[in-house]
Image (tube, rainbow, N blue to C red):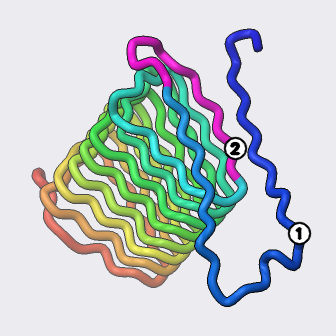
Amino acid sequence: KGGELKITLENTRKWYEYISLFSFEDTYVTVYLPTETDVKMDIDVSTGDVKIPSDIKLSELKISISTGDVECFASCAGDIRIKGSTGDVRLSGLSADDVNIEVTTGQIKLSNVECETLTTMADTGDTKFTEVNVKEITSVKTDTGDVTFTSGFGAELYVKTSTGDVSFENFDAREMSIETDTGDVTGTLLTSK
C-alpha cells in the first residue's frame, strides 16, 4: 500500500497449548526484496531474530526489538538505528552514515564497519569493535561490560563505563576520553597520546 509492505504475524495459540514437555514449533518469516532498489526498513519485533544479508541495498535501517538477536551485513546509504531490550547486535562488513545501537542486556559486536558517527549504549554486556573506522565521533557507554577496540581508527573517541574494562589493540584516534569507575584501561595505540 503506497510503496509500504507491512507484515503482521499474530499468535493464535491458546494458553494451554504452551503447556508441554517439548516444543518444536518455530515460526519464521522470510521476506525477499529486490537487490537493485534502495530499501528503507523499519522493523519492529517483539520476540525473534532479525538477519539482513549483504545483498540488500538499504537507504535507511531502523530496528526495534524486545527479545532477540540482530545481524546486519548490508551497507546503508543513510543511518542505522537499532534498539533492543534483550539480545545481541552484530554488524559486519558494511558502511553507513550514522550508526546508533542501544541494548539493555546483550553484546554489541561490530567488525569491518565504516561510518561517519557511531554511538553505542549497553546496560549489561560486552561491546567489541574490530576494524571499525569512524570519520567523526565515536561514543561508547556501558554500565556493566567490557569494551574492546581491535584495529581501527576514530577521529574523536569517548568511552564511559561503570563496571568494565576498556582495552585497545592496534587502535588509534586523534582525541580520546576514557572514563571508568571500577575497570582497567589497557592496550596498545598506534600513536602516543
Q: Is 48 on the left-hand or right-hand side of 144? A: right
Main SS category, magenta section: strand
Is residue 133 or residue 2 the one in the foreground?
Answer: 2
- Residue bounds of the magenta highlight: 33-45
Residue at 76%, 40% (x, y): give it. 8
Q: Is 118 on the left-hand or right-hand side of 68? A: left
Q: Secondary structure at mark 1?
A: loop
Residue 104: in sight, yes or no? no
Q: Is residue 134 above or below residue 9?
A: above
Residue 63: in sight, yes or no? yes
Q: Which residue is mark 2?
A: 44
Q: Is residue 42 above or below residue 39?
A: below
Residue 14 is marked as 1
Q: Is residue 40 magenta?
A: yes
Residue at 30%, 65% (x, y): give it. 148
Q: Earlier in the sequence, mark 1 or mark 2?
A: 1
| Image coords of residue 19 (percent x, y) | 78, 84
